[in-house]
Amino acid sequence: MMFDVIIIGGGASGFYAAIHIAEADPGLKVAILEKGKNVLKKVSVSGGGRCNVTHGEFDPMVLTKNYPRGAKELLGPFYTHGPQETMHFFESRGVRLKTEEDGRVFPVSNSSQTIIDCFLNETQRLGIQIYRQSAVTSIEASATENNTDTVWKITTVKKQYLSKKLLVTAGSNPKIWKLLEGLGHSIVQPVPSLFTFNIKDERISGIPGVSTPAKVDVLPRQAFNPKITVDLKSRKNIKTLFSAEGPVLITHWGLSGPAILRLSAWGALKLHDSTYRFPIRVNWLPDYHQASVLSLLLEVKEVEGKKTVLRTKVVDIPKRLWTNLVKASGITNDGKWADATREQLQQLADQLTNSRFMVEGKSTFKDEFVTAGGVDLKEINFKTYESKLCKGLYFAGEIINVDAITGGFNFQNAWTGGYIAAMAITDELKK
């Protein structure tokens, strides 16, 4: 069976590209091959089932700062097709969108099914063929009789297809990566990108669900020392590997939240190399440093001497966290401010602004598993998303070595790549 375009992968970028191809030239025969029973699986689980469609950041320069890998390559494409164009695509098809305070864009329905229905309705309207349970087992390229074009032969577990153009949008799929290696492409080995930190520590145990703004630093392995007894002034500054500031969520297994996920994305390669065992430093009062907090605590000791430290929370952090940090400073449950020694208050200042924890492993962040890795970016022409090695072969989405932090940025990479590849493919087929 001969097609003009075959798309391997029934996910976000595959559907987005297929719709744009079929709209640009309704006469083209377009097919999507999906290995599973269901299409658009990541769309379904994104944003807790609400589908975080994109991010409301319309400046490409600022937008690229959310991509640990691929920022430089995405700058030009984002000028061509960014969040504004993505939002217009959905809204022009009857999907009402809303932008939340943090910039994340969701359908007003708060349901990912709205996005899925939009895609399925459009593919049906445009006559795009969708073949489910069609895992690809081989990809071969052969020249036409005049040696000017390539015909792609794609074999699935069910049957064989021929196509003039091939777009691969199969996400983080090791089997497809292996087939692409067979075509001469280099694959940057994948490592997890978005994950939470597993930590066992009394200071955060028993208080899951507590969330507060914090600054988190990833430190060199040798820097771990949870019990600090030296004077603040004599302490050596330890070089920070990565830093992030934002909400931190205490969970049953450790720490999560936007700041932690940002660190996991930017530090993906180094943290993988450390086998996910590394120290972190948390400042629970990111607007303050140790010395200023110690001064505050000494002042409270003079003014509120008769009150107990445990029940007198004098800084803006959750009560349960304050309780745990006070106990970790060696202050008893009924210890009064007047009886607290300078050393204990110094320890408390340290716990508030310089808590050390040892991370011992990671957990996948919900169902939104993202990897760093994929087709080497040097082998892709980002004006067309075509392979520099194989004419007529295109890529989009997570199949390439691009990944982002949470907030709709990974989907935007999928939409942008799908659109540009679609336009390049239709232009080529018109020649």
Image (cartoon, rainbow, N blue to C red):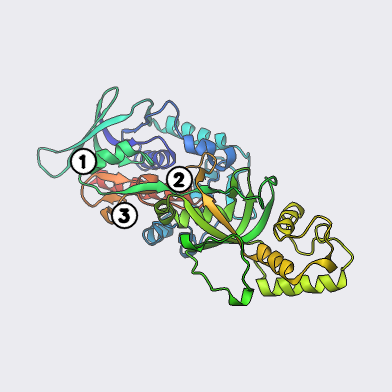
Residue at the bottom extreme of this rendering = 233
Q: Is residue 178 above or below residue 325?
A: above
Residue identifier under label 1: 182
Q: Position of residue 353 (x, y in %)?
A: 65, 65
Label 3, label 1: how many angstroms apart (C-alpha)? 17 Å
Residue identifier under label 2: 370
Please tell me which of labels 3 and 2 falls first in the chain: 2
Please tell me which of labels 3 and 1 falls first in the chain: 1
Looking at the image, which is closer to me, 365 or 5?
365
Mark 2, secondary structure of its residue:
loop
**Drawn side of residue 4 relative to residue 195, left or right:** left
Please tell me which of labels 2 and 1 falls first in the chain: 1
> Residue drawn at (85%, 68%), measured in percent from left and top?
338
Residue at the top extreme of this rendering = 158
- Which disc is residue 377 wearing? 3
Q: Position of residue 397 (x, y in %)?
A: 39, 46
User: Label 2 is placed on what type of residue?
Assistant: Val
> Residue drawn at (33%, 29%), measured in percent from left and top?
135
Label 3, label 2: how many angstroms apart (C-alpha)? 17 Å
> Residue drawn at (56%, 34%), measured in percent from left and top?
113
Mark 3, secondary structure of its residue:
helix
User: Label 3 is placed on what type of residue?
Assistant: Leu
User: Label 1 is placed on what type of residue?
Assistant: Gly
> Residue drawn at (48%, 52%), measured in percent from left and top?
277
Looking at the image, which is closer to me, 322 or 57?
322
Callout 3 environment at 10 Å: few (<14), some (14 to 19), or many (20+)? many
- Which disc is residue 65 wearing? none
Q: Is residue 56 above or below residue 25?
A: below
**Drawn side of residue 333 relative to residue 191, left or right:** right
**Drawn side of residue 400 relative to residue 46, left or right:** left
Q: Position of residue 288 (x, y in %)?
A: 67, 70
Residue at the left extreme of this rendering = 146
